Amino acid sequence: MTLTRADYPLAETQPGAVTGKHGKALPEITLDAVLAGEVTMEDLRITPQALQAQADVARDVGRPTLALNFERGAELVEVPQDFIMQVYELLRPGRAKSKEELLEAAATMRETYQAERIARFIEEAAETYAARGLFTFRF
Amino acid sequence: MTPKLNRWKRFADWDERPLRLDKFAAEDPTNGFSAFSSPADPKPGIGIKGGRVVSLDGVLEHDYDMIDRFIARHHIDPEVASEAMALDSATVARWLVDMNVPRETLVRLAHGMTPAKLAEVVSQLNALEIAFAYSKMRARKTPGNQAHVTNAKDDPLQLAADAATAVALGFDEIETTMRVSRNAWSNAVACAVGGAVGRWGTLFQCSSEEAEELRIAMAGFTSYAETVSVYGTEKSFTDGDDTPWSKAFLAAAYASRGVKMRCTSGAGSELLMGFHEAKSLLYLEARCLCLQRGMGVQGTQNGGIDGAPLTATIPGGVRELMAENLIAVWLDLECASGNDARSTESEIRVGAKILPYLIAGSDLICSGMGSILKYDNSFNPSLINGEELEDYLVLQRDFEADGGLTPLPESRAIELRERAVAAIAAVFEELGLSTPTEDMKTSVVYASGSDDTCSLMPRDVSFISEAIKERGITVIDAIKALANRGFREEAENLLNVVKLRLSGDYLQTSAMIRNGRIVSAVNDPNDYLGPGSGYRVSEERRLQLNDIRDVLDQKEVLRSEALHEKDEARHIRYRNLGPAANGSATDDLVIGISPAFGLKLYRTTAGHRLSEVLGAMLDAIRARGLKARVVRFRHTADTSFLGLSAARLAGSGIGIGIQAKGTAVIHQRDRQPHNNLELFSNAPITRLEHYRALGANAAAYALGEMPEPIVVPQRGEAMGSRHHARVALIYAIETGLTEAGAAPEEVDVVLTGAK
């Protein structure tokens, strides 16, 4: 179901449906639950579903580029932090020495994490960097 | 002989003013010094073929640099572009200031406009029009503000206290950074805890190295990031060690962690970095902003930022800063509108810089305002700092404009600072990070800045910070520590902020938290369509803005006069002798006193006892061998008429009129009421010696002499601002006692001589 601005803010209109990565819903995340050791950082992680919902809302209020960023973000939710930082580093100027390094990262995003939009985005970067000579060595 | 100088001394005076510390640069487009337009700026233009942008502002697709390419692919909406680019720029400029053209119409058109087109349109607006258009075009209706919270020692106790203070002042966001980069984790924990004191909902960021910043966010201590910088030329971008794709990837990474983020850009950065391509500041910034919309970030921090001081040296630079903020909101980006890096040493330029934003409103008027003292600001001093923050509160009151802040009573500030320091100390103790002494804590609570503290030093902080990082301490640990040590409310507050990232509601454009609820451009869109629409200061909010400290009212004036009543009773007695007669002797002078003189009011505005003032005048008159009568008038409280009426009763034809507040006049019978002999209008600076001299001169006139008029020296003090509120309240007490046709009463004055 595609959400609209009427569903916003989700934390107010459907708190029970807003959950963390382990499925714990907003009303269950209380101070007492934290003190009882029942809440971990993983319970405080956004889900791809929530990001998709925000993308729907953003599109409904006329912000398609913001929606796309949320959708790219949704794809990265399951990607480990280290790999995210590795790819970010690779996208910086001169880090990748060839187009292939970036294409490889794109392939991992696509195959391992089903991050199709992200993969295409990295491929677009690879193509641009090649055209603009960004694979040159930097001291 | 007066020596002949080689310059007009006024220039020497001007040399001494803070303004002359500012340096100004000549317009020089070739070297990048042009605000609005340069010969190197391209003409607006677009080519669309098969739904693809094949040329952008005169550059063909195969010649695109990285920025052109990103804008063409991710910003330009090909379906809108042809229509938008064909519009006459002057017409669009008029629409921006036309209250009947809705914001949405203009936002849709911006999706199809190139950087050169956006720059060309806003260039047509003057400063007032830009401010107005900004007010109409900004995304969220309710204005907000952001604070810097840092200190020169990276002292976490002070960070916590200052964060709590900033929260209480109403800042919607607080931003910290460090003197020593490895202290980032300690800063983050300290501000997160301090920011949870008093209320919840203030968003917090810790500006540090990109990867580190994301890790701190992952640990739950921060809730947003805004230092993801972008640049308007390819060379600057790669020199800044990034590309549009790396930064866009980072934007998606932040979203994937449920952390709000905005980019940073602003005039002057390319110029500072040496890769300006001889383009104007506005055109380059328009490129940055199109890029940001293309990246899909919810907002931007722009308006010069670190480049603001340089931009302000260029002709039209300050207007350019406003114009680039306008492009940001026109592109539907949240705007943290600069007004941070202090762009001038002149307080007049500071006030002028902030005013348009204050009255237009902005998502975050400053990004941010120094809530701490200048020397404690690790970003560099802000436009407005802890020193001047009260000035800003008064500007809000002056213009009935909501600048996002609320005056903070002193007792409340102390209470919150004590609580915040105790809270962070408890967290550190509970987690085995540090045990701050009572002395440290007390020094911080009362400190205006880190010069006043004896607390943790940067090296101590480094151990704390490294431990937080190495032990993998998260916000959950901080929440537990708070609750275990009795700071349950703060623990709840902190948990509430972290919970925001679950729904992602605050990732939407211009989101902030007010009264525990999300307020963003989605549920609080700016709906300005002329007077009566858009953001209006409610009556409740107006009263909050008005509530600055030390406000005078009639009750306060009467209370302070009552304190003097007993004291005056020891020094003087007034006895009414009945109707005053016309004097006939030539040595007869009359001092006419006002209705409340010595009856309800007891001191002049300079603080002199009325008994002393009267005594000084009487002594001086008698010293010349003349006689002085005191007559109370009740038909008028006006100085001129008091003086003239006194002169008419006096056998010598010379009278003195004096009001309780100390304003006095020497008058002569047969003169026009306002054509007196001498006027002493500046009571607040009129000293007893002046009243004595006044008496002496009055006597001299009575003796037919022509004395040198008394000059009460003034140095240009803003007498009205200092005294008029009090004066008006006092004068109302005088006029309240007047009665039409009341006859003058002769008064016997007995000065007791008591010390």
Image (tube, rainbow, N blue to C red):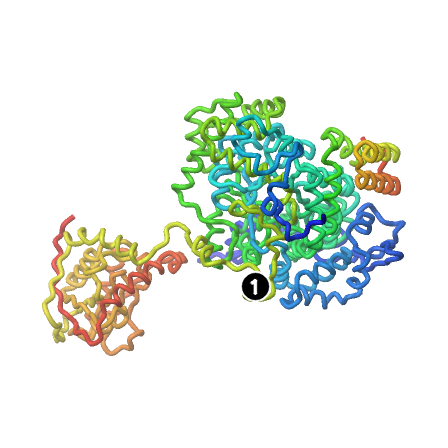
Q: From the viewer's perspective, is residue B462 above or below residue B116?
A: above
> What x and y, as percent, mark residue A55?
71, 47
**Which of the 4 image quarters holds residue B116?**
bottom right
- Residue lying farthest left? B577
| Direction from residue B384 to residue B676 in the image, left or right | left
Image quadrant in which the N terminus of chain B is located: bottom left
SS of the residue under disc 1? loop
Q: From the viewer's perspective, is residue B292 above or below residue B530?
A: above
| Direction from residue B303 to residue B575 in the image, left or right | left
What residue sits 27% from the left and 67% below the top? B665
**Chain of the residue under label 1:** B
Q: Is residue B248 visible?
A: yes
Q: Dot 1: within a 10 Å radius of its alpha carbon, few (fewer than 14), some, or many (20 or more) residues?
A: few
Q: Is residue A138 visible?
A: no
Foreground: A60 or B275?
A60
> What x and y, as percent, mark residue B695?
22, 63
> What x and y, as percent, mark residue B596?
22, 63
| Direction from residue B612 to residue A102 in the image, left or right | right
> What x and y, as percent, mark residue B571?
15, 53
**Which of the 4 image quarters holds residue B527?**
bottom right
Foreground: A61 or B579?
A61
Mark 1: amino acid: Ser
Residue that badge 1 annotates: B533
- Residue lying farthest bottom? B670
How many marks are shown on the rendered structure? 1
Foreground: B583 or B467?
B467
